[in-house]
Image (tube, rainbow, N blue to C red):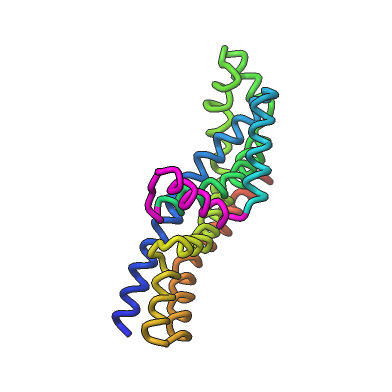
């Protein structure tokens, strides 16, 4: 029993590592995609729109297989954890980009005009005026994104990453205690995600109060 719990806890740490890394990739790439869309250059918008549609249409597991097995087929070897971080982060970036774009729209156009009047370029206005004011509005959906990534990180088991589901499957095969292992996994997820979900709800209430003040 104690050995099983310890093994699952080690898997939980790997799951957190995958979700955290994927979240960083998603947040950074999502911001880049949103900025490209906002710049309004036709070739850039076409590229951004095509990439976003592709990422939304293709299952995350397919992207994971493409990175892990596809790169391996051309001689580029990456470990399963890194493959999961990159694949899940890239897949989630298509949705994160929309969070940023929605945040951009909360900044009044007069703020941009003020930036232009100071001699800032369009990119300068975005990065120095718009993005800093956007951050408070995108924090709640970004935290929600992290909660989602904690759950989708279990896909990493498909390429042998030793995350919680992978270790759980091994424990079930070894001990036959299916109900016990599944219950422990569920409990660990609840312990981790409940505070995050609560934090998101509190932030959303505060933002609504701020918007109506």
Q: Quadrant of the C terminus?
A: top right
Q: Is residue 112 left or right of residue 17?
A: right
Seen at 45% across and 75% down, the residue is 185
Indicate the position of residue 64 as horizontal and vertical percent values.
Answer: 51, 53
Asked if one can make out residue 185 in the rendered structure from this viewpoint, the answer is yes
Q: Is residue 147 above or below residue 74?
A: below
Asked if residue 199 lies left or right of residue 105, the reply is: left
Give the image location of residue 22, x and y in percent: 47, 50
Q: Residue at x 69, y 30 (%)?
A: 46
User: What span is in magenta?
Assistant: 59-81
Q: Quadrant of residue 47?
A: top right
Residue 135 image-quadrant placement:
top right
Above or below: residue 184 compared with residue 98? below
**Magenta residues: mostly which secondary structure?**
helix
Residue 101 relative to residue 90: left or right? right
Which x, y percent locates residue 88? 51, 52
Would residue 170 be found to the left or right of residue 30 on screen? left
The mark total stands at 0
Image coordinates of residue 105 in percent, x first then y, are 68, 35
- Of 125 and 48, nearer the camera is 48
Q: Residue at x 49, y 71 (%)?
A: 190
Image quarter of the N terminus = bottom left
Q: Nearer the viewer, residue 142 or 30?
A: 30
Magenta span contains residue 33: no
Q: Is residue 171 positioned above or below 19 on the image?
A: below
Residue 22, can we see it? no
Magenta span has 71? yes
């Amino acid at each position: 029993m104690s050995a099983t719990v310890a093994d699952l806890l080690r898997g939980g740490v790997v799951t957190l590592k995958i979700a955290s890394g994927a979240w960083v990739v998603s947040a950074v790439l999502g911001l880049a995609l949103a900025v490209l869309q906002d710049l309004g250059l036709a070739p850039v918008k076409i590229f951004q729109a095509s990439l976003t549609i592709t990422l939304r249409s293709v299952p995350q597991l397919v992207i994971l297989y493409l990175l892990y097995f596809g790169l391996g087929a051309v001689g580029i070897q990456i470990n399963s954890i890194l493959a999961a971080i990159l694949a899940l982060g890239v897949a989630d970036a298509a949705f994160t980009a929309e969070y940023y774009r929605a945040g951009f729209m909360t900044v009044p156009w007069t703020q941009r005009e003020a930036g232009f009047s100071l001699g800032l370029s369009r990119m300068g206005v975005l990065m120095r005026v718009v993005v800093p004011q956007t951050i408070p509005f995108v924090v709640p959906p970004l935290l929600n994104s992290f909660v989602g990534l904690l759950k989708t990180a279990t896909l990493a088991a498909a390429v042998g990453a030793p995350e919680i589901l992978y270790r759980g499957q091994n424990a079930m095969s070894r001990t036959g205690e299916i109900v016990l292992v599944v219950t422990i996994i569920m409990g660990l997820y609840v312990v981790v995600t409940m505070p995050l979900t609560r934090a998101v709800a509190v932030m959303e209430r505060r933002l609504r109060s701020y918007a109506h003040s």
